[in-house]
Image: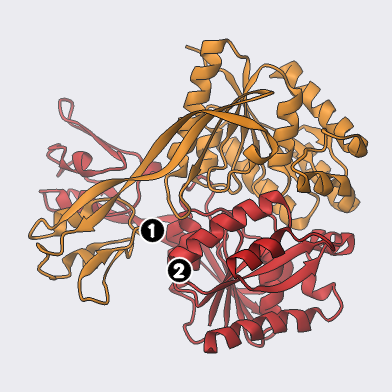
Chain colours: A red, B orange
């Protein structure tokens, strides 16, 4: 079973919840898909056994074969290629390229455009005790996290309990992280920001027709902001984690909430059990 | 024509306090246009009371659509698509996944019967609004849509036009989290990146990555440590890191429950009297920016 932990708003506690959940489920795998800012390793402290580059193909234009017809530049919607016919010059802007392969496809001359791998980031695999760990790290200056997330998912076993830590926001990288999951856990905080971004996240998972539930983090007594919303929308709140300076302070030192609150393991194992029950209904 | 100075508030890690700080600074620093560049999860409007003056549709990527009457179900588009966006649906027809389609148009070329065409989709709206503290340019994307970088560029361009027309001195931009496309668009052409960090291991880790981006795009960076009283040791670590990299720390905002309490009421820490220490530090940061940028 794959569970993706997402939130919309950043800093609501996705990572601490995802790590805590993974550590509370026997033999589970934690996957850090927040590849722009992967922080899960700071909490899990895994032993890394394998690191390898993630590459995507980009075109290499061989100017000795290129006839400067300009078909590739005309076809490229990302404007990543410019062909200057009069002076027989081909220019390629790698930061604009989306690795779609269209330029090579439309090129009329065999061998004028060769697709070569370019490193976009790294994937690291390892583990801690009985738990497996994987993370993606996007290279600095790379524009899109989506291909790396897509690439990383190929290494996630289908038959394992997997917790995927999604990036913040509501755009493509989040959709890619959530897609193919069996359940989405939305972590929110009871503030107007948290609620606003939760509503956006709910729109996505509903459109994607995925089952989902809410964990309220930094919950305060007498604050019913999220409860009222969840009741109205008929969404399950699977857990409420209280706000405390002790949790925040432990977090600052890289200790996940599961190891701070009393009965932490039970609380998170319970979330997992509820999800499993719901999916078996 | 010269660009109006842009101060961009960034953080790498989400939830460090970008939007709260931006709203507070916007209320103190005079003579500016305000931009919310976190178009994936735009929250600045919650803290700044505003009236919409102009609303425009944002056209983002084009998405492929397959004419099932022309389609011969050869599957070549599915095989060639690098974004895994085309699959057979339950009726046996090939269809395009709106979220996964990157808009590259390769499928329109590979289709032997020309059954695929690209349609430009409306993926969001953007607005020009008036607040008591100046004009605000903001927008929102349909959840799941891409091209936030393009929308950020558009918002900043509009802010530049407004600032030039009205003779306004500076633009304050509330940036998105992360280090990807919308962050790069926010940084592009900026005068100063104000990095809001927190003294947590995650905060420090992400600070390092966001500063690398600033360096790569040659934008001067300054640091604000938010929630500073959570972990004094980590504050020291940030200070040493800043010193080593010759980056100035222009503010240390203490952790205070009053900030969250105010936010629950849609108020910034500078709106009330219960948040004096936080307010004082934000005023100091405002003066620093007003004097130099």
Residue at 73% over, 22% down: B29
- In the image: residue B255, left or right of residue A134: right
Looking at the picture, do discs 1 and 2 lie on one chain?
no
Residue at 20% over, 43% down: A75
Indicate the position of residue B272 as horizontal and vertical percent values.
Answer: 86, 35
Indicate the position of residue A36 as horizontal and vertical percent values.
Answer: 57, 54
Say which of B158 and A156 sits in front.
B158
Say which of A49 and A12 sits in front.
A12
Residue under label 1: B99
- In the image: residue B85, left or right of residue B241: left
Instruction: Decide: is B293 above or below A139.
Output: above
Name the chain letter of the residue that bears numbered label 1.
Answer: B
Cα separation between marks 1 and 2: 10 Å
Q: Residues within 10 Å of mark 2 (few under 14, many from 20)?
A: some
Say which of B121 and B293 sits in front.
B121
Kindly tell me whether residue B236 is visible in this rendering. Answer: no
Kindly tell me whether residue A265 is visible in this rendering. Answer: yes
Q: Secondary structure at mark 1?
A: loop
Q: Residues within 10 Å of mark 1 (few under 14, many from 20)?
A: many
Name the chain letter of the residue that bears numbered label 2.
Answer: A
Q: Are marks 1 and 2 in contact (CB under 8 Å)?
A: yes
Instruction: Decide: is A214 above or below A94.
Output: below
Indicate the position of residue B252 as horizontal and vertical percent values.
Answer: 85, 38
Residue under label 2: A179
């Amino acid at each position: 079973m794959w569970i993706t932990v997402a939130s919309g708003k950043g800093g609501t506690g996705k990572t601490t919840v995802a790590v805590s959940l993974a550590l509370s489920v026997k033999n589970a795998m934690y996957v850090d898909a927040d590849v722009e800012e992967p922080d899960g390793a700071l909490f899990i402290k895994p032993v890394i056994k394998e690191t390898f580059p993630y590459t995507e193909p980009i075109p290499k234009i061989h100017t000795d074969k290129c006839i400067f017809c300009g078909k590739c530049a005309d076809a490229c919607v990302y404007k990543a290629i410019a062909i200057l016919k009069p002076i027989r010059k081909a220019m390629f802007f790698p930061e604009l390229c989306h690795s779609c392969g269209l330029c090579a496809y439309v090129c009329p001359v065999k061998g004028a455009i060769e697709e070569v791998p370019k490193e976009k980031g790294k994937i690291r695999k390892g583990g801690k005790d009985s738990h497996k760990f994987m993370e993606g790290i996007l290279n600095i200056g790379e524009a899109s996290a989506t291909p790396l997330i897509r690439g990383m998912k190929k290494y996630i076993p289908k038959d394992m309990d997997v917790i995927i830590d999604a990036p913040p926001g509501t755009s493509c990288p989040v959709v890619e992280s959530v897609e193919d999951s069996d359940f989405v856990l939305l972590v929110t905080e009871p503030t107007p920001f948290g609620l606003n971004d939760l509503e956006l996240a709910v729109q996505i998972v509903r459109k994607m027709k995925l089952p989902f539930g809410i964990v309220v983090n930094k919950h305060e007594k007498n604050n019913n902001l999220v409860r009222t919303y969840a009741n109205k929308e008929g969404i399950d709140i699977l857990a409420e984690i209280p706000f405390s300076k002790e949790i925040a302070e432990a977090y600052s030192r890289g200790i996940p909430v599961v190891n701070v609150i009393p009965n932490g393991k039970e609380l998170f194992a319970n979330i997992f059990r509820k999800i499993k029950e719901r999916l078996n209904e | 024509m010269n660009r109006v100075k842009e101060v961009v508030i960034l953080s790498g890690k989400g939830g460090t306090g970008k939007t709260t700080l931006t709203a507070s600074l916007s209320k103190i620093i005079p003579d500016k246009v305000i931009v919310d560049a976190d178009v994936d999860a735009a929250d600045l409007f919650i803290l700044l009371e505003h009236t919409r003056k102009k609303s425009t549709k944002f056209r983002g990527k084009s998405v492929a659509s397959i004419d099932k009457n022309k389609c011969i179900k050869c599957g070549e588009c599915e095989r060639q698509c690098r974004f895994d966006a085309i699959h057979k649906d339950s009726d046996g027809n090939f269809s395009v996944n709106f979220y996964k389609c990157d808009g590259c148009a390769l499928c329109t070329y590979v289709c032997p019967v020309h059954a695929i065409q690209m349609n430009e989709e409306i993926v969001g709206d953007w607005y020009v609004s008036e607040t008591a503290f100046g004009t605000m340019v903001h927008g929102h994307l349909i959840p799941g849509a891409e091209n936030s970088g393009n929308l950020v560029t558009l918002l900043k361009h509009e802010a530049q036009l407004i600032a030039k027309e009205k003779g306004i001195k500076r633009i304050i931009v509330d940036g998105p989290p992360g280090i990807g496309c919308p962050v790069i668009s926010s940084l592009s052409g900026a005068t100063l990146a104000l990095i809001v960090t927190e003294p947590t291991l995650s905060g420090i880790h992400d600070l390092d990555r966001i500063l690398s981006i600033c360096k790569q795009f040659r934008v001067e960076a300054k640091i604000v440590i938010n929630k500073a009283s959570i972990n004094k040791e980590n504050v020291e670590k940030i200070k040493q890191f800043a010193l080593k990299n010759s980056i100035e720390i222009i503010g240390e905002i203490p952790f205070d429950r009053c900030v969250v309490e105010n936010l629950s009421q849609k108020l910034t820490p500078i709106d009330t009297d219960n948040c004096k220490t936080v307010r004082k530090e934000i005023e100091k940061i405002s003066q620093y920016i007003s004097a130099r940028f």
